């Protein structure tokens, strides 16, 4: 977080300057700016912390589907607070997206059971193989993922409310990242041991964190732009397509620390099918 959150500020500032939105600050109401700042603190500081803890416990592939609960939270809040509507295809698509966490949870539990059997093996070779395998921590991981999902699911309402009537998604991202960075710096300075903990970061990991910071900002910039153009009931579910990218990246980059079984792949395909249904329904009704 010490790398990925502050990185968003200069990137957002550059994007706002290049698009000219940096000079359109007066088009945002004070209330809108507060909503955007609140979404940044909620999403980039609080939710991201629990997201990283969930990824450490479950792996990114295992944590991703659990956090799809954020979709339901966002959609329910949008219907209740923003008077958005649901259609039958939307509900079908969301159900397909939602069922994948349940499938993946069963896959992880079965995998852990197999690893427990390997721990009881007699040969040294089997013990070494068992020790090298990644063991997801279900209880801690799912708890952190659920907290992150609640936070992530609430932030779209703030974003949509802050950007309503404008097309200033890039500027909204700048406000959100700035608020989150100031909050993170304040927390790091006040919480005992946080500065020392940040300094102990493995230097070999810094390039990966930096790359993640750039990619996350690009994704979030498009995320904010989408909310300035489309309703929450469309953007929030389609955003869950990021699970497919997680699986692909996990397979090619981090294969030894991910749960990548045929069952998981099937769950991802179901999620993808739900995303396609949502996109088609939006195009037909739009």
Image (tube, helix red, strand yellow):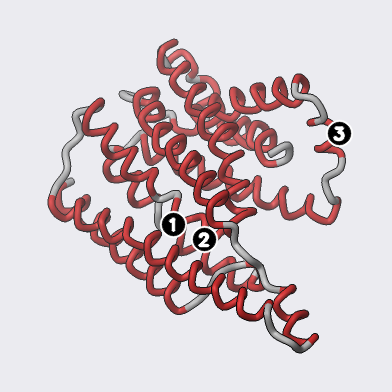
Mark 1 / mark 3, whichever is N-terminal: 1
Depth check, front residue: 6 or 11:
6
- Image position, residue 45 (x, y; %): 59, 32
Residue 214 at x, y percent in the picture: 64, 47
Residue appearing at x 44%, y 63% in the figure = 105
Q: Are marks 3 and 2 in contact (CB under 8 Å)?
A: no
Give how far apart the Cα atoms at labels 2 and 1 are.
Answer: 6 Å
Residue 126 vs residue 235, the one in the foreground: 126
Where disc 3 sits, the SS reads helix
Q: Quadrant of the image for the N terminus? A: top right
Name the element at disc 2: helix
Characterize the local packing of mark 2: few (<14), some (14-19) or many (20 or more) Cα atoms within 10 angstroms. many
Question: What residue lies at 66% left-to-right and 22% top-to-bottom?
Answer: 182
**Alpha carbon distance from label 3 to label 2:** 30 Å
Q: Residue at x 41, y 12 (%)?
A: 31
Disc 1, SS: helix
Q: Which mark is residue 65?
A: 1
Q: Are marks 2 and 1 in contact (CB under 8 Å)?
A: yes
- Neighbor class of circle 3 (other Cα within 10 Å; few <14, some 14-19, many 20+) is few
Is residue 149 or residue 215 the one in the foreground? 149
Whichever of callouts 3 and 2 sits on the residue coming sooner in the sequence is: 2
Tell me: 164 left or right of 125.
Answer: left
Residue farthest top in this picture: 30
* Residue 148, placed above or below residue 108: above
Spatial CA distance of label 1 from label 3 is: 33 Å
| Nearer-the-camera pick, 222 or 209 | 209
Q: Is residue 159 above or below residue 62?
A: above
Q: In the drawing, what numbered circle is on residue 62?
A: 2
The image's mark for residue 196 is 3
Mark 1 nearby-residue class (10 Å; few <14, some 14–19, many ≥20): many
221 vs 83, left or right, is: right
């Amino acid at each position: 977080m010490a790398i990925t959150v502050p990185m968003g500020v200069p990137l957002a500032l550059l994007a706002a300057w290049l698009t000219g939105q940096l000079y359109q600050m007066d088009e945002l109401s004070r209330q809108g700016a507060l909503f955007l700042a609140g979404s940044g603190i909620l999403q980039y500081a609080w939710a991201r912390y629990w997201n990283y803890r969930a990824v450490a416990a479950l792996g990114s592939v295992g944590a991703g589907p659990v956090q799809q609960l954020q979709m339901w939270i966002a959609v329910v809040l949008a219907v209740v607070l923003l008077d958005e509507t649901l259609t039958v295809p939307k509900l079908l698509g969301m159900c397909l997206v939602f069922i994948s966490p349940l499938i993946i949870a069963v896959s992880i539990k079965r995998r852990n059971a197999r690893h427990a059997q390997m721990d009881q093996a007699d040969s040294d070779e089997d013990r070494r193989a068992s020790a090298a395998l990644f063991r997801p921590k279900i209880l801690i991981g799912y708890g952190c993922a659920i907290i992150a999902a609640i936070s992530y699911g609430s932030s779209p309402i703030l974003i949509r409310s802050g950007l309503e009537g404008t097309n200033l998604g890039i500027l909204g991202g700048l406000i959100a990242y700035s608020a989150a960075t100031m909050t993170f710096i304040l927390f790091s300075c006040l919480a005992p041991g946080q500065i020392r903990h940040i300094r102990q970061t493995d230097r070999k990991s810094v390039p990966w964190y930096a790359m993640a910071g750039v990619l996350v900002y690009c994704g979030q910039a498009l995320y904010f732009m989408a909310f300035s153009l489309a309703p929450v009931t469309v953007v929030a579910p389609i955003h869950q397509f990021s699970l497919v990218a997680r699986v692909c990246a996990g397979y090619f980059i981090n294969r030894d620390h991910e749960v990548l079984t045929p069952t998981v792949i099937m769950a991802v395909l179901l999620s993808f099918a739900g995303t396609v249904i949502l996109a088609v329904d939006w195009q037909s009704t739009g």
